[in-house]
Amino acid sequence: MAIIQMPESLANMIAAGEVVERPASVVKELVENSIDANSSWIKVELKEAGIQEIKVTDNGDGISDTDCEKAFLRHATSKIKDENDLFRVHTLGFRGEALASIASVSRLTLKTSTGDKASTYLVLEGGQIKEKNISDARKGTEITVKDLFFNTPARLKYLKTLHTELGHVTDVMNRLAFSHPDIRFDVTHNGKQLFQTSGSGDLLQVIRDVYGMNVAKSMLPIKKETLDFYITGYIGKPEITRSNRNFMTIIVNGRYIKNYLLTQSIIRAYDTLLMIGRFPIAVISIEMDPYLVDFNVHPAKLEARFSKEKDLMIAIEKVIREQFQKETLIPTIRSKP
Ligand code: ADP
Ligand code: MG
């Protein structure tokens, strides 16, 4: 067979395999776009765990009428323009492939307005534009994703039960809310509210809104500044634990990540305070120079590479231990009188 360069529609579908694994990945990408657009309010409405429909509405900057179609092109982004930007990413998105990927495997509707005259209404099916019109949208953006994977049956079949998929979506939304206490989130499933946050900026309030009062009451604040890191957040007292690791959230420069080694540092700090098979609840936020961390590891941007990983592991373990010592959960060793 002769070599051909793939048409964009096919390339998008292939890329979607990496970016869009399940409804939770769509929710993550859409909400991260809303966050990048300076929204102070984001509403997420799901039907059937997002398999049937995901609607994300924000009050952010909106997309100009002339840019709307471009937003669905692969590698089209307003967030970085050269290599220098790539090493100093300050937005959650930068790869310019989420909208193209999501649109290629769903029926997508966009309503958006930057606040001035022209508001846009755009309908895509499997990545192809089906309709473009003027809308009545107020400033902000509303994206509806229906029938995810309707044109990729193998992917659709691979989805788990509604219960499992909803669990993944909830996990993503919880962590996004923890990462942005200053944003008001409202999340519903089949018309029923899952949680709502106030946008007051207070992380402990978000923990209460998401995990409930009992958990929030048992959290201890942490805070530490080292040469390279500024660490803040809340850790659960050892008496409130969970049977899995999902209740530990690590946020780096406003982005939650999955990192086994850093999670192990948290667990190590608890040491004998934890029973076997039990795991702590913690939300830990770390600020560092963007030069010290690389998020461009995988398309889903859930992984990060740190140039001072060891130092960071030690700092996390230390700040938690120091807090336990303050609370006298761990006796400090005293010299003999
Ligand atoms: P990336 O986020 O990596 O730039 P995306 O494919 O997710 O790529 O989005 C493409 C572009 O569409 C963004 O760079 C942004 O300009 C625009 N965009 C997407 N969602 C929104 C939104 N909710 N509000 C404003 N602009 C948006
Ligand atoms: Mg994006």
Image (cartoon, rainbow, N blue to C red):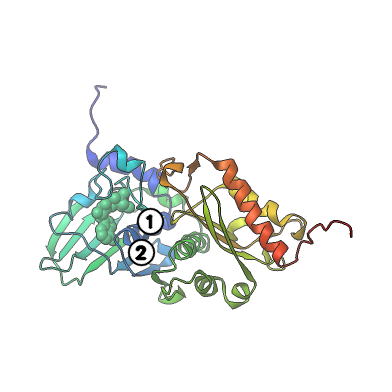
Q: Residues within 10 Å of mark 1 (few under 14, many from 20)?
A: many
Residue at the (77%, 56%) spot, across then down: 272
Residue at the (37%, 55%) spot, across then down: 29
Q: Is residue 313 above or below residue 48?
A: above
Q: Earlier in the sequence, mark 2 or mark 1?
A: 1
* Spatial CA span between label 2 and label 1: 8 Å
Task: Tell me the tag on residue 85.
Answer: none
Under tag 1, what secondary structure?
Answer: helix
For the residues labelled 2 and 1, say whether their Cβ atoms are less than 8 Å apart: yes
> Which residue matches tag 2?
54
Spot occupied by residue 46 in the image (x, y as percentages of width and height): 39, 68
> Which residue matches tag 1?
26
Residue 26 shows in this picture: yes
**Is 13 in front, or is 296?**
296
Quarter of the N terminus within the rendering: top left
User: As shown in the figure, which amino acid type bears the numbered disc 1?
Assistant: Val
**Is 28 in front, or is 333?**
333
**Is 36 in front, or is 42?**
36
Q: Is residue 296 above or below residue 197?
A: above
Assign ligand 1 to one image quadrant: bottom left
* Numbered marks: total: 2
Under tag 2, what secondary structure?
Answer: strand
Spot occupied by residue 194 in the image (x, y as percentages of width and height): 47, 73
Q: Residue furthest top?
A: 2
Residue 234, quarter of picture: bottom right
Residue 9, quarter of picture: top left
Q: Is residue 11 above or below residue 4?
A: below
Quarter of the C terminus within the rendering: bottom right
Spot occupied by residue 14 in the image (x, y as percentages of width and height): 34, 40
Cβ of disc 2 within 8 Å of ligand 1? no
- Would residue 276 appear left or right of 280 to someone viewing this image? right
- Would residue 89 appear left or right of 252 to someone viewing this image? left
